[in-house]
């Protein structure tokens, strides 16, 4: 008998208008993936064989020599860095995070971001020393060349909306310089659709989350050179054990990749565009709210709706609207990383048409409520920031299931 976890454990349903956020469960996993995972969960399988088969699919899809699956992208980052420190030496693998020899891992300072946890911590966990390259808002070739000249075990390059976008080294320039110094480049592509770009440019490894746009089970997909992938996979005999990918993760990633290969991407795009169009229509005439279509920052084929709020006219701040939406049942989660600038974004990729209509109606309702009650523009950004930080610490291991 199937248990409905929402009813059984008093969980609040969530409508996801934010994209692929792991904090609310990343993606809606399609039936085909779930059925395949279900099949393996009831069986035994040789994990080495399974991972090797996964590598075949990853190689095919990414153009890399080989691949393997980690428990998530963060784990994949730690394990590929460890692989650059140990190679396929099992004694060194068991010694991590203590390791002799070159431990420097270069990371542009503008890429030293937080995807839910800090990028640099994923590197340090392997026992590596993070060497920031460039300054907070600029990285030039001379910064990288100088750091490379002092030696490095690896360099990490992050592609993400979280990073600084201007005045950074383009990926081809970064990889080219590192290759000139024989330093392997690991590219964090956790949330990116481009499965082939980094490998084509000569990256030694590219990392993707299986549970984000691929809509698989929580997993980290690593594509790369045969030697680096072998050394990465072998980390499961060391620190990889603390971040183990089970058979469900590996099979979930394999199924998701094959579905992605055969997916009608045009049809998916059109469905997403229809949802964005619905929002543009339904939210068009709210006072103090300006709408526009916004292409993804890093070039992913997603067009979101940007909601730019003029508080003096709208009667509320962006963070107040986001707060009201999140307090509803179902909870409505919008993209709020730029709310400090009075901007919210609606992402069409992870919700049904019906949910998209619910989101539009809810935003309209909340905006009207603020206007009618005049209780907006009360909470400052500082208040919000303090409250959000307090909420992190308020998590309790024994929730009141009221
Ligand atoms: C989501 C994300 C990660 C972490 O991915 P997980 O698979 O959830 O561990 C790392 N880097 C970037 C840029 C991300 O967007």
Image (cartoon, rainbow, N blue to C red):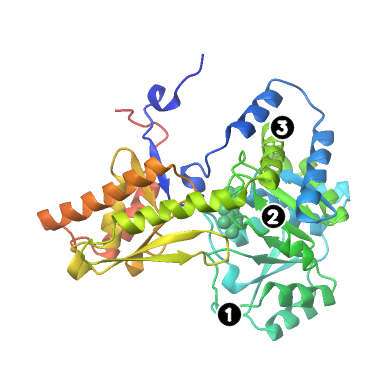
| Residue at 29% in and 52% down | 323
| Residue at 72% in and 64% down | 197
Single out the mark in the foreground, 1 or 3: 3
Residue receiving disc 1: 135
Q: Residue furthest top?
A: 1
Q: What percent of the width, then of the height, locates residue 245?
A: 69, 38
**Residue 244 seen in the figure:** yes
Give 130 or 46, whichever is nearer the viewer. 46
Specify few, some or many for label 2: CA neighbours under 10 Å numbering under 14, 14-19, or 20 or more: many
Task: Name the side, left or right, on which 398 lies relative to 174.
Answer: left
Q: Marks 1 and 3: CB-CB under 8 Å?
A: no
Q: What percent of the width, then of the height, locates residue 370?
A: 17, 55
Question: Which mark sits nearer the N-terminus, 1 or 3?
Answer: 1
Residue receiving disc 3: 247
Q: What percent of the width, then of the height, locates residue 239?
A: 73, 45
Residue receiving disc 2: 207
Task: Name the side, left or right, on which 227 lies relative to 54.
Answer: right
Tell whether circle 2 marks a residue whose Cβ is less than 8 angstroms from ligand 1: yes
Q: Is residue 295 above or below residue 10?
A: below
């Amino acid at each position: 008998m199937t248990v409905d976890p929402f009813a059984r454990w008093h969980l609040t349903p969530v409508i996801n208008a934010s994209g692929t956020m792991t904090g609310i469960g990343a993606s809606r996993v399609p039936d085909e993936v779930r059925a395949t995972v279900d099949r393996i969960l009831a069986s035994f399988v040789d994990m080495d064989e399974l991972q090797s088969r996964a590598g075949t699919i990853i190689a095919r899809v990414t153009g890399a020599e080989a691949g393997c699956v980690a428990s998530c992208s963060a784990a994949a980052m730690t394990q590929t860095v460890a692989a650059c420190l140990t190679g396929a030496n099992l004694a060194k693998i068991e010694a991590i995070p203590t390791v002799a020899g070159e431990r420097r891992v270069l990371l542009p300072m503008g890429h030293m971001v937080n995807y839910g946890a800090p990028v640099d911590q994923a590197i340090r966990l392997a026992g590596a020393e993070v060497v920031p390259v460039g300054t907070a808002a600029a990285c030039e070739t001379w910064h990288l060349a100088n750091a490379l000249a002092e030696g490095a075990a690896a360099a990490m390059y992050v592609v993400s909306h979280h990073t600084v976008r201007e005045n950074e080294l383009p990926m081809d320039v970064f990889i080219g310089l590192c290759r000139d110094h024989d330093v392997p480049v690991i590219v964090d592509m956790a949330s990116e659709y481009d499965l082939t770009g980094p490998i084509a440019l000569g990256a030694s490894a590219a990392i993707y989350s299986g549970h984000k746009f691929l809509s698989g089970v929580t997993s980290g997909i690593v594509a790369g050179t045969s030697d680096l992938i072998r050394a990465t996979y072998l980390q499961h005999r060391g620190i990889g054990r603390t971040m183990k990918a089970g058979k469900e993760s590996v099979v979930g990633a394999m199924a998701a990749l094959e579905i992605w290969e055969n997916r009608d991407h045009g049809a998916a795009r059109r469905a997403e565009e229809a949802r964005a169009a619905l929002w543009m229509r339904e939210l068009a005439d709210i006072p103090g709210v300006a709408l526009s279509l916004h292409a993804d920052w890093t070039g992913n084929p997603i067009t979101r709706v940007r909601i730019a709020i003029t508080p003096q006219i709208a009667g509320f701040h962006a963070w107040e609207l986001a707060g009201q939406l999140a307090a509803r049942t179902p909870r409505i989660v919008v993209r709020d990383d730029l709310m400090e600038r009075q901007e919210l974004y609606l992402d069409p990729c992870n919700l049904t048409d019906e949910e998209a209509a619910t989101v539009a109606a809810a935003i309209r309702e909340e905006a009207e409520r603020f206007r009618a009650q005049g209780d907006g523009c009360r909470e400052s950004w500082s208040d919000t920031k303090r409250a959000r930080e307090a909420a992190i610490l308020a998590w309790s291991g024994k929730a009141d299931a009221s």
